[in-house]
Image (cartoon, rainbow, N blue to C red):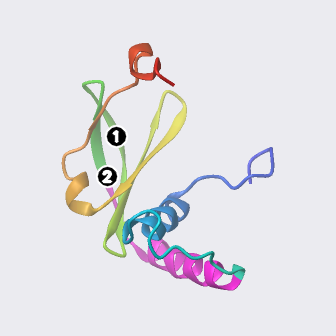
Amino acid sequence: MNPRGLPVEDASIQMVNFLARADRPLGHGLTAPSRASSRTGFDQVRVAVNGAAVQEVEVAIDGEGVRGTRMDALDAAVVELAWHGQAVFVTGWPDALQTLALRAATPADVAHL
């Protein structure tokens, strides 16, 4: 937990969130999960994540190589790296994360928000 009492993001949480949304289009077949079904799903993901091998990777952010780690489990992947003092997670299908290049948002990118 962080100082505000909220869970700290980690690979397990990233994987749970990705897998919960990845296999169904928004608005179709969505049901409110029970506390028990949520706990069971989270526990299954945590076991898979804890047993997964971690690989070192390099991700290009704004053209500079940033070293991080990658973990593949349950047919998905999570890349975690530190950038400017923040934890950055990228979660998706393994093939989509083979060549990963990120860039920081500019004021023009977020002006419409």
Q: Residue furthest top?
A: 107
Q: Which residue is mark 1?
A: 67
Determine the image quadrant of residue 72: bottom left
**Can residue 55 be found in the magenta stretch?**
yes
What element does badge 2 sit on? strand
Question: What's the residue at 34%, 58% (across, down)?
Answer: 92
Q: Nearer the viewer, residue 8 or 107?
A: 107
Answer few, some or many: residues within 10 Å of disc 1's Cα (few below 14, many 20 plus, some between 14 and 19): some
Q: Earlier in the sequence, mark 2 or mark 1?
A: 2
Amino acid under disc 2:
Glu
What element does badge 1 sit on? strand
Amino acid under disc 1:
Arg
Please report the bounds of the magenta region as a residue range.
36-56
Q: Percent x, y for residue 63?
A: 24, 25
Q: Is residue 48 above or below residue 106?
A: below
Question: What's the residue at 51%, 63% (across, down)?
Answer: 17
**On-image quarter of the N terminus:** bottom right
